[in-house]
Amino acid sequence: MTFAIEVPGEAAPLSQPELVRALRAASTSTDHAQRQSAGQQLQTWESDPHYYPSLQTIYLDKSLDKQVRFLAVILLKNGIDKYWRHTAKYAIRPENKQLIRSRLLQGSLNEEDTTLLLHNALVTAKIVRIEYPSEWPDAFSTLIELTKSANASNPLQLRGALVVLLRIVKELGTARLRKSQTALQAITPELVQLLGAIYTEKTAYWQGLWTKGHGDQANADFAIENSLTALKILRRLVTVGYEHPHADAMVCGFWSLSQTQFDQFLSGVSQDSWIPAPYQDVVGKHLIQFTKLHIDMSEMHPASFPLLPNSLSLVRAYWSLVKGFSQVFARSGGIKQSSSETAGGNPKQEGPLAEKLALKGLLLLRSCVATAYRPAQTFKYKSPEAKELEKQAVHTIKVDLLTRDLLLEMVQVIISKLFVFRQSDLEAWEEDPEGWESQERIEGQAYEWSIRPCAERLLLDLLTHYRELGEPLLAYCELATKVDMDIVTKEAAYCALGCAAAVIHQAFDFDRFLTTTLVKDAQIQDPMAKLLRRRIAILLSQWVTIKISETSRPVVYDIFRHLLSPSDQRNDEVVRITAARQLKQIADDFKFDGETFQPYASDIFNLLVGLLQEVETDETKLAVLETIRLLVTRMETHVSQFGDAIMLTLPKLWESAGSEEYMIKQAVLAITTALVVSMRTESQRYQNVIIPLLRDATNPESALHLHLIEESVELWKSVLMQSSPPLNPDLAQMVHLALPLLEYDSEVANQCLEIVRDYIILAPQDILSDVLRRPTLAALAKTLDSKSRDQSQLGAKSIELVIRAAEELGGTQGVSVVVQDLLELDVLRTILEGLHSAWESSQTTGPNRKPSKINTIKETDYFALLARIALADPAVFVAMLAGFGGPLDQVWPWLSAQWFANFDCMADVEREKLSCLALTRLWELAGSPAQDLVLARLQDYLSMWTSVVTELVESTADGEVVSRDSLVWTEVGRYEYDTPLDVHAREFAARDPVHRVVAFEFVRERLAGLVQRVGGEQAFEAGWAVDVDREVLAGFQKLSRDLGTAG
């Protein structure tokens, strides 16, 4: 294929030679600049329609270098993810897709290099997952025919076909779309029949060669490789390709074959083996595949597992294998995870085959216990037959498998043999202390590839569901406290004691054991003492949360102080990290008391901080920091005397974390927040240290800004909560960093709104300054249009606070300045247009009704803002209205009608009183047209006054008036856990007319003033009251008499 297409910019035209040249430069050049230029060129060509077919052509060209072909197939694989689907920008064209599909199998069947073969198979699998069966219906049928043909004549092609099948089955087997699952299940029976025949034929071939001498070595090499690949496919198909595997004859036959061959192959990898040494490793891989089959079947089809042939006998055989291995466990070399990876991307596990098989046996037993006691929950419909099948499976496992004799034997073997700390474990400990400690902890994943952690998990499972097993364990633990044991045996006994804590705590006197035994054991000076010290830290964390006396807690704290001390050479890095990690469980206990811990706190904090300087991995640093955070939180105010030491360390740790390690900085912010909350007002002395951290974390130009936003906002809120006015000038100026954050996701924006609100309360003079006032109002105005109800309401209330603060600090002039800002920002125009839309909607009905632009909740928020302006200065309010849409007599009628109607929707007595006071203040305006417009709504006013004042009155059961206004505060309350912000906010609220003015008196004074201005009561009644509904007028007069008498 030759072509040359110009691409935009400075990119070279795409052609086959140019593409080969770029691939060679990107993969083999030693010049960094040349590699980078080639990489950019390749990226530019991604939009060219011929790019991906050309990559495939280069991959198929075996005359080219392997590195060039390898990079070509890698780029092709990446392109499938990005551009294969038709919705993608620069999506691969249909004709090019067809071309790529037509050559996929060719690229695998004749490929000798296994790495290239694998990656081409991955490309094929990705495309099949997307295209089969809709766009590529013959994918499987073609591959099946090629596999059959290759099996008859060409073992190299068979290898390629099987690798492709394996990757496809893996891809479809992990797909979540029902389409992919159904497609795989539909083809599974045909695949199982084909692969079963291939597997049987190939295993018979290499078995015949090594047992009877039939065949040749070259074909045997292909045969054993292909039998392993076929087995990998089969074990996946029988678990993901059937809904009820036990009901299929082929599955049952393969299941029986797996058990028969397991015994045969196991004998083949023993000392007196019939398998040549070079091939024992690959036969061992066959055995591992069998174990994975058995475990997967138990986990994925728990109802079918007991019904498959000889399944219970299989589990017992696995236990016999585990029991046999336990005799040599102490001498085994252990399983280690290597840095290299399998084809699937998982870390390789290296170690003795016998230990790997024993581990799989333990995992299978754990799966059986889970089937019996923790059945998987699913939303998928289950027929009555399926439910009955599951019920039978649970009964079979409980009754026929997990017998008391087997359970007792399992407990005995685990605690006496499998808990033993081996030389290989010690070597792994010393080789990578931090990595080993992290993997071995209870929450770690070591149980998946290590015997001891897995045995510990199995014992915990058994004790959880068979509490009667605590009796033999109790006897064993009692013996361990009385008999002199070597350190390794004692460490195993303490491991069992920790596992049994929840079962034997009522019968075992742990407090006596703590003081008489553990205290001494923690001080043993022996080269192996570190094993015991690590186990003691874990043991204490397991028992303290279950049962321990208050008098024993100081002993526990003293032991941890000792275990954390680097001055004792037996406390190596693993011991101290384990102690630091387990101390978190101690502090997290419900009965932890900061006062009891205080005598040990100073030393322990210093030791934890010192450990923090020594450890290297982020995971370990985060664990130590989390322990410090929790201790700070649980000690509450008792932490004050240690705050200086902690705050001295945190900025250094922040700086050492660099610009990329955001998790460390998150932990620093979390600890600082805990310290501020615990120390309360005393934390104000650290604000000069905290503010630079906050400024750095909230800097929008910082690379870590988004990663730290949640923790920094939480700290910011805590600092403001514990601050008293006047604020630290640097803290006050930080408000400008909060304003852009109001546009973030709802949760962060809500918290930042609270921060801005807190600034308005604590530093109103700063917020109202020329520098901050307009930006603050502009940011708050945007929140009014938020889709989040909480956010829009909080934004509206914050603007209310600005108006109130302006009135307090600047009177009429202050309110005028804020109103002018709101006018110029179009906030008031938006409010009035929204309210006018609501009024128009209320005036129309039926199918022609106009929809309102705002809902009733937002309408209430808008009226509250208008009420704040009117209550602060009615003249400013009227002047503002006159600035919109012509004369006041054109705005007031519809606005007042909608305002009075909104009282039915407010559902908040404070909002009702606020609007009542604001509307009533308009009665102070003398002269036309305001006075006449207000009087024109006299009936609405009388109804509003009667309703609101009645709601505010507090009366006894017999009708005696206790308070004429329940919202008026006679004093500002103070409470034990008040923060400075709480106190100041309450004092600010107490100065609000809503909480300071008695509504009835307020109304009576304004009504009396207007009556006098219109000529007295007779003129008022004749000119205005005469038009009011008699019932409305009588209701208000009765209320006035009642409250007048009460006053």
Image: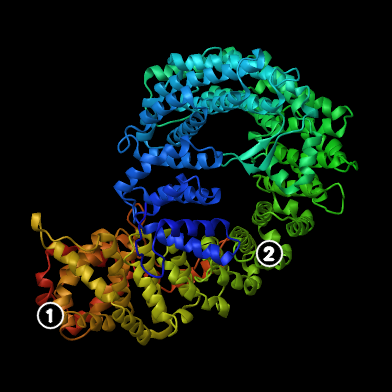
Chain-order first, disc 2 or disc 1: 2
Residue 1036 visible: no
In the image shown, does 446 or 536 lie closer to the viewer? Answer: 446
How far across and down, in percent of the image, does residue 416 sit? Answer: 78, 24
Color encoding of the figure: rainbow
CA neighbours of label 1 inside 10 A, class few (<14), some (14 to 19), many (20+): some
Q: Please identify, in this view, whether the residue under mark 2 or under mark 1 is nearer the observer.
A: 2
Residue 689 visible: yes
CA neighbours of label 2 inside 10 A, class few (<14), some (14 to 19), many (20+): some
How far across and down, in percent of the image, does residue 68 sit? Answer: 52, 52
Instruction: Find residue 1028 and name its label.
Output: none
Q: Amino acid at mark 2?
A: Leu
Q: Is residue 402 left or right of residue 699?
A: right
**766 to 461, vertically: above or below:** below
How far across and down, in percent of the image, does residue 314 sit? Answer: 60, 16
Q: Is residue 487 left or right of residue 817?
A: right
C-alpha distance separating marks 2 and 1: 80 Å
Corner quadrant of residue 186: top left
Corner quadrant of residue 240: top left
The residue depicted at 16 percent of the width and 63 percent of the height is 1032
Q: Is residue 40 left or right of residue 913?
A: right
Q: Secondary structure at mark 1?
A: helix
Q: Amino acid at mark 1?
A: Ala
In the image shown, does 671 or 635 lie closer to the viewer? Answer: 671
How far across and down, in percent of the image, does residue 598 sit? Answer: 75, 55
Instruction: Find residue 1019 and name its label.
Output: 1
**107 to 49, vertically: above or below:** above
Corner quadrant of residue 346: top right
Q: Secondary structure at mark 2?
A: helix
- Residue designated by label 2: 653
